Image: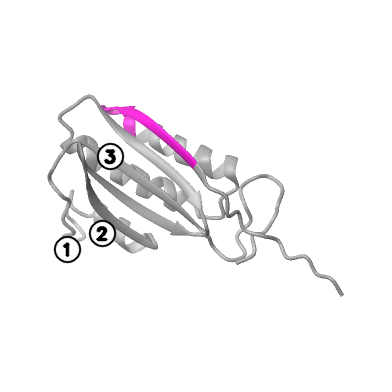
Amino acid sequence: MNVIAPTRPAELHACRVRLTVGPAAAAEARGRVLESIRAWGIPVDPDIAVLLSSELVTNAIGHETGNSIVLAITCSFGQMRVDVHDTSRMLPVLVDAPVDAEAGRGLMLVATLSATWGVYRTPTGKAVYFTLAFEPGLTGADGRGQTWGL
């Protein structure tokens, strides 16, 4: 008997967007991430992806001295990755902020909800990223109702 299992997308998808520093940057980032998830049929929780993207962008615009930051979204080999590039040389620090603190919990959310996260220096500053692993049994957001096999 021949059985055909659905395959997970292994091809590389990539999108880079320059975002103008300002109040609309986080909303634009959320929209671009959601658009990529839908267009590429990525089987990740879109609510988590947009939340974590918003956190990274908000942190970046808070430290950016220039006019723009770069949002990079990639998808390949079982994971989605979001990188946010800025020109600040200051590396983020994961802190154990109290639950009633008004700030300082964003990176904790990223660390808790992502598969991996990190920071690396770039020639112009730094980039902070997170990854989300494809979720077994999650229907791809491509409108075809296909369940990705993992």
**Quadrant in the picture for residue 149:** bottom right
Circle 3: residue type: His
Upstream in the sequence, badge 1 or badge 2? 1
x%, y% of residue 101?
A: 16, 54
Q: Residues within 10 Å of mark 1 (few under 14, many from 20)?
A: few
Upstream in the sequence, badge 2 or badge 3? 3
Q: Can residue 24 be seen in this view?
A: no
Q: How crowded is mark 2: few (under 14 residues within 10 Å), some or many (20 or more)?
A: some
Most extreme residue toward the right is 1
Q: Is mark 1 on a helix, strand or loop?
A: loop
Residue at 32 percent across and 31 percent down: it is: 25
Q: What label does residue 127 carry, if any?
A: none
Q: Which of marks 3 and 1 is in front?
A: 3
Tell me the CA gap for discs 3 and 1: 24 Å
Q: Do the residues labelled 1 and 2 touch (CB within 8 Å)?
A: yes
Circle 2: residue type: Met
15 w.r.t. 55: above or below:
above
Q: Any magenta on residue 17?
A: yes
Of 74 and 51, nearer the camera is: 74
Residue at 24 percent across and 51 percent down: it is: 120
Circle 1: residue type: Asp
Q: Which of marks 2 and 3 is in front?
A: 3
Residue range highlighted in magenta? 14-25
Q: Which residue corresponds to mark 1?
A: 96
Q: Which residue corresponds to mark 2?
A: 108
Q: Which residue corresponds to mark 3?
A: 85
**Quadrant in the picture for residue 70:** top left
Q: Is mark 3 on a helix, strand or loop?
A: strand
Q: How crowded is mark 3: few (under 14 residues within 10 Å), some or many (20 or more)?
A: many
